[in-house]
Image (cartoon, rainbow, N blue to C red):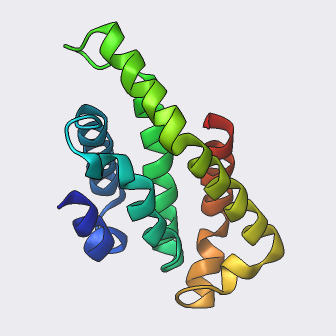
Amino acid sequence: WVLSYLASSGPKVAPFIVSSLVQLLCRITKMGWFEDPCHQKITDEVGQFLHASSKHCVIGLGILTQLVSEMNLPAPGRSLTQHRKTASSFRDLALLQIFEVALTTLRSIQAGSLAQAGGAAGAAADDSPKLQELALQLALLS
């Protein structure tokens, strides 16, 4: 539900709401990583954000960045063994794909092809520094 709300209304709502929803989504994903296999496919679902407008791309990169950060932090109320098991599974199943997304995004920005994709060119140009920042941050975290 959170992911579909971000896809439909994310670019229109205030940034602090988007940030809170992204944090909620990442925490739910972390807590449910072994409970439901759909949580392990989050990178595929977030990939749809990256092929939409530049505003959606910013949200998608933010989700992936927050997800990598969240998976590295132990959750209160869970044992260190559970944290390590979740973090190791995340590393094995999703981290390489996330790193490749970051590199692909950086290459697209450098080539200028991302600035022409999805939406008005003016809006994409406004988001270009933010996209660069998020893609670099994501590449460094992963």
- Furthest residue in direction bottom, as rendered: 120
Residue 110 vs residue 31: left or right? Answer: right
Residue 36: in sight, yes or no? yes
26 vs 83: above or below? below
Q: Residue 65: horizontal and vertical position, in percent?
A: 51, 44
Residue at image position (23%, 37%) is 32
Q: Residue 122: horizontal and vertical position, in percent?
A: 61, 86
Q: Quadrant of residue 23?
A: top left
Residue 59: in sight, yes or no? no
Residue at image position (51%, 63%) is 58
- Furthest residue in direction top, as rendered: 80
Q: Residue 7: horizontal and vertical position, in percent?
A: 32, 71
24 vs 50: above or below? above
Residue at image position (63%, 88%) is 121
Where, quadrant-wise, is the N terminus in this rendering?
bottom left
Q: Quadrant of residue 80?
A: top left
Q: Quadrant of residue 110?
A: bottom right
Q: Residue 45: horizontal and vertical position, in percent?
A: 38, 63
Q: Nearer the viewer, residue 73 or 11?
A: 73
59 vs 24: above or below? below
Residue 58 vs residue 2: left or right? Answer: right
Q: Nearer the viewer, residue 98 or 140?
A: 98
Q: Nearer the viewer, residue 37 or 2?
A: 37
Q: Nearer the viewer, residue 58 or 90?
A: 90
Where, quadrant-wise, is the C terminus in this rendering?
top right
Residue at image position (49%, 41%) is 93
Residue 49 vs residue 105: left or right? Answer: left
